[in-house]
Amino acid sequence: GAVVSQHPSRVICKSGTSVKIECRSLDFQATTMFWYRQFPKQSLMLMATSNEGSKATYEQGVEKDKFLINHASLTLSTLTVTSAHPEDSSFYICSATVDRPNYGYTFGSGTRLTVV
Amino acid sequence: AQSVTQLDSQVPVFEEAPVELRCNYSSSVSVYLFWYVQYPNQGLQLLLKYLSGSTLVESINGFEAEFNKSQTSFHLRKPSVHISDTAEYFCAVSRGGATNKLIFGTGTLLAVQP
């Protein structure tokens, strides 16, 4: 149980275009999801906390207008990278908390974004 | 605010040798502690976690970690490593609850050599 599906796994886009990444909880309801960004050989940096039905809470230094987060249902959160540039190339990972039966966090498999 | 320190960025070790990956945390409140493993170009897999109860927690593949409140540590150990254990290991801390975020350490690359 507690599976999070993330799509796409890889995407290449042209500079200036927008890319949407989806994160779905398959067998549980996720009121809260988290979006992380990971640069090569580095740790995961929390970008934002996504709450179902309300605005996301962004970490300091993360541009809200560039990284649009929507959490329209209890099973789906999306991250849209708008007007992407090469410096946005990174590995993006989503996560959701699970309360029952045991508390924890489950992660998607990640999305490798390359902006050319 | 919580923070996590992983002092070793890389730990080289020979196959079948024991290993310890260090993790220290800082928090003014009670926390939950986690170890995750990440293989190249993949997401994170939970290795083990401490929520409450016994301070020694074990994973199904031979890893264990001990929560030490006085030393604010949660070091990961394995008595005998395999080549397949080569991966990046992340220690993480959370305050618990559905809306509280998970904060990661900088990671330790465990490099097992034959």
Image (cartoon, rainbow, N blue to C red):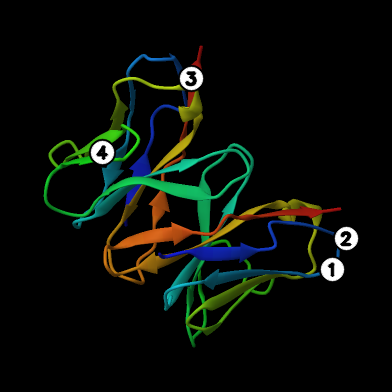
Q: Chain of mark 1?
A: A
> Is residue B75 among what the camera can see?
no
Query: Residue A17 shows which numbered tag?
Result: 1
Assign the N terminus of chain B to one quadrant of the image. bottom left
Q: What residue does disc 4 label?
A: B74
Q: Quadrant of residue A8?
A: bottom right
Give the CA distance from mark 2 to mark 4.
43 Å
- Are callouts 2 and 3 both on one chain? no
Q: Quadrant of residue A5?
A: bottom right
Q: Chain of mark 2?
A: A
Query: Residue A14 shows which numbered tag?
Result: 2
- Where residue B18 appears, as percent x and y from the top left, is 32, 18
Whether residues under marks 2 and 1 lie with C-beta atoms below 8 angstroms apart, the answer is yes
What's the residue type where badge 4 is placed?
Phe
Depth check: B31 or B83 in front? B83
- Where residue A12 appears, as percent x and y from the top left, is 82, 56
Depth check: B9 or B80 in front? B80
- Where residue A67 appears, as percent x and y from the top left, is 65, 69
Give the CA distance from mark 3 to mark 1.
42 Å
What's the residue type where badge 1 is placed?
Thr
Q: What residue does disc 3 label?
A: B112
Give the CA distance from mark 4 to mark 3.
21 Å
